[in-house]
């Protein structure tokens, strides 16, 4: 039975970048997002200091609709999730 709904493909990637504080790595991630035409990207960054996470994610994802960062000073697992509407 055809519901009349149109399905979209959603492209998602998760990447342990290792060095997102470096401008070169930020550009690599930005390029990957463009080349792969990602809709959602999760960056896992173990070594980036918590106070620099938001700035690095903002530079990397630029004008995407939304970005969420999580950093815990006691745990070395930080992540940034960004997405834009399909």
Image: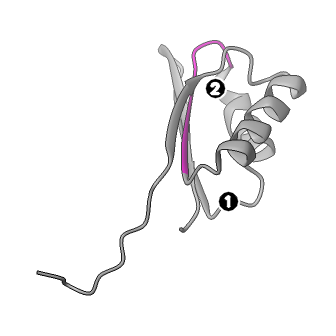
> x, y (%) of residue 76?
52, 13
**Badges 1 and 2: C-beta atoms under 8 Å apart?**
no
Residue 4 to residue 73: above or below: below
Q: Earlier in the sequence, mark 1 or mark 2?
A: 2
Q: Helix or strand or loop: what does disc 1 sit on?
A: loop
Residue at (29, 82) in percent of width and height: 5
Q: Quick one: quadrant of the N terminus?
A: bottom left
> x, y (%) of residue 39?
55, 54
Q: Is residue 75 left or right of residue 21?
A: left
Residue at (84, 34) in percent of width and height: 27
Inspect the magenta stretch and tell me whether residue 44 lies in it. Answer: yes
Residue 19 to residue 79: above or below: above
List the residue tagged with mark 1.
Answer: 64
> x, y (%) of residue 4?
26, 87
Residue at (55, 68) in percent of width and height: 85
Main SS, magenta region, reads strand
Q: Helix or strand or loop: what does disc 2 sit on?
A: helix
CA distance separating discs 1 and 2: 21 Å
> x, y (%) of residue 30?
77, 41
User: Which residue extends farthest right?
Assistant: 23
Q: Which residues are magenta?
A: 40-48
Q: How packed is label 2: few (under 14 Cα within 10 Å), some, or many (20 or more)?
A: many
> Picture quarter containing residue 17?
top right
Seen from the viewer's position, the closer of residues 84 and 73 is 84
Residue at (36, 70) in percent of width and height: 7
List the residue tagged with mark 2.
Answer: 50
User: Which residue extends farthest front?
Assistant: 1
């Amino acid at each position: 039975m055809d519901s009349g709904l149109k399905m979209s493909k959603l492209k998602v990637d998760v990447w342990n970048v290792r060095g997102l504080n470096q401008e070169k790595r930020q550009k690599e991630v930005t390029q990957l997002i463009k080349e792969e035409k990602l809709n959602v990207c999760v960056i896992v960054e173990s070594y980036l200091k918590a106070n620099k996470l938001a700035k690095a994610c903002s530079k990397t994802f630029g004008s995407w609709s939304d970005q969420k960062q999580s950093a815990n000073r006691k745990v070395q697992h930080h992540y940034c999730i960004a997405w834009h509407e399909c």
